[in-house]
Image (cartoon, rainbow, N blue to C red):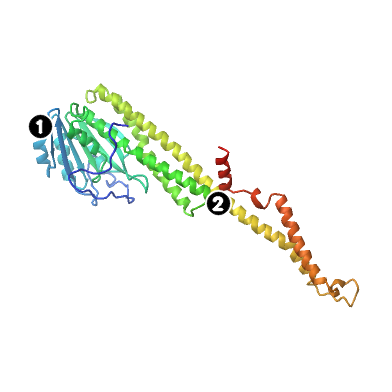
Amino acid sequence: MGSDAPGTSGHSAGPQPAPQRSRRSRKRRNLPGTSPGTLVVDPEAPRPVLHVLAFGPDGVDEAAPRTVAELAALRGRRPVTWVNVDGLGDAAVLEQLGAEFGLHRLALEDVVNTHQRAKLERYEGHHFLVLRMADGDGASGLGTEQLGLFFGPGFVLTFQERAGDCFDPVRQRVRGGQGRIRASGADYLAYALLDSVIDAYFPVVEAAGERLELLEDDVLAGRARDLLPRIHGIRRDLLVMRRALWPLREAVSLLQREEEAAVTPETRVHLRDVYDHVINLLDMLENLREIAAGLMELHLTAVSKRMNEVMQVLTVISTIFMPLTFIVGVYGMNFDPDSSPWNMPELRWRWGYPFAIAVMVGTVVAMLLFFRRRGWLGSGSGTFGARREGDRRHGA
């Protein structure tokens, strides 16, 4: 991972709204047959808010211009200008930004259509990278947010769906002159932003792993009744991250093999490290998905086993009462002992009733002893919790 711990807060210029975690529709808003490059924004999306960091070896200029015209006046004062845009709800502002930096309209169309998979596109004068940022901490559900990143000679543009990101460590490095970021070009800043997005996935994946460990204890102990939806929720989060990271692997691979002057050889070396991080994350996700699948099977097996134990008890009870029902049924027959000496003569015996009760009690005791000897009752049947405790004691 990078040298800075990933953060999740927004810009330091003011308070940021809480991230939206509701499931939003991802259908395309462009009608079939629409001219390529047409920008159709989501009417519910927030209006764009601009934030500029212009820097070089000699210093940093930071501003929050309200219009693209004010941004144009700031451009060119420093070797590198980073413009971050929070919100995609104004097509006019996006078109003005595209005209100012010479962005291709097809790339701008991909920016406003926030269902894109990770990819890298090369255009004349700039590169366009689409990726997804983790939206959540992995402890209570997860979503992703699309990030559109443009970089070219002397500029980097980042387009986010809403405020709040993981770029604060990069901003602190730029402001404080830490590392070599202020002495490098726009390609190194693009790498730093990409590395920050990838690093932000690690705590989310680790939190999902911790949730699985807690669920494993609950499954083995049978302490909760809502285990199935909780396991399914974790599997869904893992699938969301896999969908975000799997295509990003190819995009980062293409970027690190970029031979144009837009990406310096030293930046390509750092991009190889980012590629390794993506592969590491994918391996972690695959392992956790296998654990989650096994945990679901274990839960279903435990439920089936508990049901079998209940059926076993009911079967034993029914089996015990079968001979008792037979005995009381025999003595419930209407035979007259006065008509024949063979018609249940014990009905006139002084100890007939105590004898019948003793026979039934003896039958119950004999059957219980037989069931226990065969291992159908008692500790011989075992439970998941007892077996797990035995494994711990024996170091299994």
For mark 1, what is the residue? 77
**Exactly how many numbered labels are in the figure?**
2
**Outermost left residue:** 73
Q: Which badge, 2 or 1, comes first in the chain's sequence?
A: 1
* Left or right of 174 in this view: 350: right
Whole-percent x, y for residue 22 in the image: 32, 51
Amino acid carrying mark 1 in the image: Arg
Where disc 2 sits, the SS reads: helix
Query: Which of 335 and 389 lies nearest the eye of the viewer?
Result: 389
Q: Residues within 10 Å of mark 1 (few under 14, many from 20)?
A: few
Q: Secondary structure at mark 1?
A: loop
* Image spot of residue 335 (x, y percent): 84, 74
Q: Which residue is mark 2?
A: 303
Amino acid type shown at disc 2: Val
Occupied quadrant, residue 108: top left
From the viewer's perspective, is the residue at label 2 or at label 1 nearer? 2
